Amino acid sequence: MELSVGLMIMLAGGVLVLPVLAFITSFLFWPGALLKAYNWYLRRRQGLVVRYSYNGSYRFCYHTRGKPGGATPSLLLLHGFSASKDMWLPLVKYLPRNQHVVCVDMPGHEGTSRTSAKDYGIQGQVSRIHQFVESIGLDKRPFHLVGTSMGGSVAGVYAAHYPAHLSSLTLIATAGLVYPTDSKFIRRLKEIDEGHGGNSVPLIPTTVQEMEDMAKLCYYNLPKISRQLLRGLLNNRIPNNDFYREVFMEIVGDKNRYLLQENLHLIKAPLQVIWGKEDQVLDVSGAAVLQAALPSCQEERLDNCGHSVAMERPRKAAKLIVDFLTAQAKKNS
Ligand SMILES: *[C@@H]1O[C@H](CO)[C@@H](O)[C@H](O)[C@H]1NC(C)=O
């Protein structure tokens, strides 16, 4: 559920640099292309390289920096519904330069193969991520897995199935739980189920207005965004909307919706939980559910923060993860 709203935050927040200003002028009428160019620019500036790996003819796209085998384990980051590996760019910026980090496009998203529904449910995604891990040899030593929202559900179920692969696990505003309190988003879904108020899913915008509503749903503090930027974000999403609907139906279906909850008892890896207190997509009461099931977990609830933690508070989220990794590494040495 992390969109590329991070970009508009950065653009709107005045982190503009000259080359980007040039882009803005030339792409004024192609705002979607501008956003893609800006991601490309950020990746370069942060020293991230885009790579591909394969399982048979299935292709994974990821970006990475650093080498495995440092003082802390490798980091694998799993993004949320309808986002891409680039949603992690703001967070990666605050990781130590020598930290080995891998951000992968989830099945069907961006550069990773788009196949069929069997790869889109949580279990299907876990199998694909497992193939990805093997395809780049990340399983040679235990790594730290981070997942947010839908990616959190995948990360948690992965931890339950492949405990030997992981040194530890971070779940950020994760999906897949039975939340004691309904969020605004869940209330909206229930209304749709009951046949009130149309059938447009708030996370699959089709107009500029719906795009803005989604951004507001995902952020607590959303800076002012120009219509031009909203248009760009929307233009990049619209060609994927049928795919997003297909994924969405899978992950909210009976087999998947609570799959993480059902697997919690199998998680052995040390767990860190991060959640924005003002999350309107998946209620922060989910953190207490994890705490009850896994009492030794380390829980961090962030004030004035919504669902898109990694984009709204990238510096804080990066620091929490690095501190957790460092503490775990000390414990094990
Ligand atoms: C694909 O992944 C599966 C599961 O990890 C593995 O058994 C198989 O060897 C892989 N195939 C290829 C062609 O890499």
Image: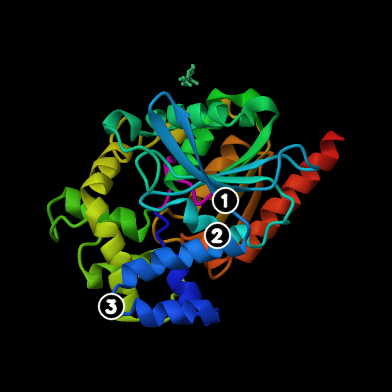
- Sequence-earlier tag: 2 or 3: 3
Cα–Cα span, label 3 and label 1? 28 Å
**In the rendered image, which quarter contains the C terminus?**
top right
**In the rendered image, which quarter contains the N terminus?**
bottom left
Q: Out of 76 and 21, give the one closest to the viewer.
A: 21
Quarter of the image where one finds residue 118: top left
**Residues at marks 1 and 2 touching, judged by CB atoms closer than 8 Å:** yes
- Residue 180 at x, y = what percent? 43, 48
- The part of the chain drawn in magenta is 172-181
Quarter of the image where one finds residue 329: top right
Can residue 16 be seen in the rendering of this structure? no
The answer to whether mark 2 is within 8 Å of ligand 1 is: no
Label placed on residue 251:
none
- Residue 263 at x, y = what percent? 49, 28
| Amino acid at dot 2 | Arg
Examine the rendered structure and indicate whether residue 136 appears above or below residue 273. Answer: above
Q: Dot 1 corresponds to which residue?
A: 49
- Residue 332 at x, y = what percent? 83, 34
Q: Out of 98 and 21, give the one closest to the viewer.
A: 21
| Amino acid at dot 1 | Val
- Sequence-earlier tag: 3 or 1: 3
Q: Secondary structure at mark 1?
A: strand
Label placed on residue 43:
2
Query: Badge 2, how many Cα within 10 Å: few under 14, some, many 20+?
Result: many
How are the residues colored?
Answer: rainbow
Looking at the magenta stretch, what is its main secondary structure? loop
Residue 138 belongs to the span the image colors magenta: no
Q: Residue at x 46, y 68 (%)?
A: 38
Cα–Cα span, label 2 and label 3? 23 Å
Q: Residue at x 74, y 51 (%)?
A: 98
**Residues at marks 2 and 3 touching, judged by CB atoms closer than 8 Å:** no
Q: Secondary structure at mark 2?
A: helix
